[in-house]
Amino acid sequence: MDTPSCTLSESCVVPVIKSPKDYQAYRISSQDTNRLAIVFDPTIANMSLTYCVEIFDVGGKTPPNRHQIAVEMFFVLKGEGRATCDGKSMLIRAGDSILVPPTGVHVIENVGPSRLYALCIMVPNEDFAELIRSGIPAELDEEDLAVLGRQDGLPASLVSCP
């Protein structure tokens, strides 16, 4: 495969690359049972979106919430949960995707025996990144970093490099 190159007459865009150790995690309030680790936000992406990883403790859930104009999407990385939107609930697990349209009152909750991890993307941002950053800083622990680095379920021979 050829590597693209840019000439002076073309625009060259350098991608922003982050790893889990670069993510900033927060709890929106001290009562929350979920943490949000920001991956990209309007400041980093230079566009109106928020991309984060939402981590739910066992039994954890979001408070019921809605967005006036934003679409919110989730992709479950690990765990088991329940997604409820406007009173309709579905069980979710790793590999499932959820799309919540604007104005849908929704809740994501962990109903499994271990943490629930989900990618979360909101477009446009609708002040979501600002709400997260106004919360309480939280740490990502070894379990979080293993899941986000895709090392939690891999055989040791595939995790370590020779």
Image (cartoon, helix red, strand yellow):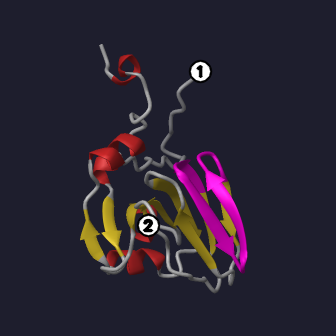
Please give the count of numbered marks on the rendered protein: 2
| Residue 71 on the magenta span | no
Q: Nearer the viewer, residue 8 or 47?
A: 47
Residue at 70 percent of width and 63 percent of height: 90
Percent x, y of residue 42: 45, 70
Would residue 71 be seen by someone viewing this image from the given angle? yes
Percent x, y of residue 20: 34, 48
Q: Which residue is mark 2?
A: 41
Highlighted magenta segment, given as a residue range = 75-96
As displayed, is residue 100 above or below residue 31? above
Q: What element does badge 2 sit on?
A: loop
Residue at 38 percent of width and 61 percent of height: 37
Would residue 123 be seen by someone viewing this image from the given angle? no
Q: Which residue is mark 1?
A: 1
Residue 60 placement, left or right of 28: right
Residue at 43 percent of width and 60 percent of height: 58
Residue at 50 percent of width and 80 percent of height: 63
| Residue 85 on the magenta span | yes
Which sits earlier in the primary sequence, circle 2 or circle 1?
Answer: 1
Q: Amino acid at mark 1?
A: Met
Q: Quadrant of the N terminus?
A: top right
Q: Nearer the viewer, residue 61 or 15?
A: 61
Category of crowding for the residue at label 2, using alpha-carbon neighbours closer than 10 angstroms: few (below 14), some (14–19), many (at least 20): many
Residue 158 placement, left or right of 67: left
Percent x, y of residue 130: 39, 79
Percent x, y of residue 49: 53, 68
3D distance between C-alphas at marks 2 and 1: 32 Å
Q: What element does badge 1 sit on?
A: loop
